[in-house]
Amino acid sequence: MDKKTTGIIATVVTALLCGCPGLAAVCWGALAAIASFVPGADIDIMGSRDPQSALTTGLGALCLGIVFIAIPVVVGFVTLRKKPDETPVIDEPLPPAV
């Protein structure tokens, strides 16, 4: 298997294992953050009915989701980028200066 195929497989696997949960975390975090501002909303975040806990949890989920979405992007960039060719080292002696 060549390096490009390995890079594609790594990108797809990280997209499925990190990108999809990251998208779900961003959606849920946005929903929780918006619900914290709705007056009279039925908020229940781990047994707490405080809107501040919904806002804190929502913003935390948004940040975590963004990190999870960034992981496949970074893996794809690192594994699929075209690396510059190495320049050959020439160890020949220089001709004498005149």
Image (cartoon, rainbow, N blue to C red):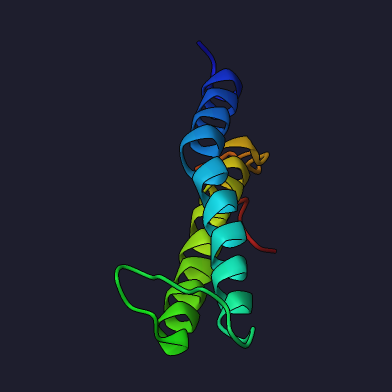
**21 is higher (above) or lower (below) than 37:** above
Residue 36 visible in image? yes
Residue 90 visible in image? no
Foreground residue, 78 or 51? 51
**66 is higher (above) or lower (below) than 54:** above
- Residue beneath the point at 49% across and 54% down: 68
Say left or right for 64 vs 86.
left
Residue 15 drawn at (x, y percent): 56, 37
Residue 57 drawn at (x, y percent): 42, 74
Number of labels in the image equals 0
**Residue that extends furthest to the top in the rendered view of this protein:** 1
- Residue beneath the point at 56% across and 44% down: 19
Residue 79 drawn at (x, y percent): 55, 38
Foreground residue, 85 or 59? 59
- Residue beneath the point at 39% across and 80% down: 49
- Residue beneath the point at 57% across and 29% down: 12
Say left or right for 86 vs 43.
right
**Residue 80 sits in quarter:** top right
Residue 32 drawn at (x, y percent): 54, 71
Foreground residue, 87 or 58? 58
**25 is higher (above) or lower (below) than 42:** above
Say left or right for 98 vs 25.
right
On the rendered image, what quadrant is the C terminus found in? bottom right
Foreground residue, 33 or 82? 33
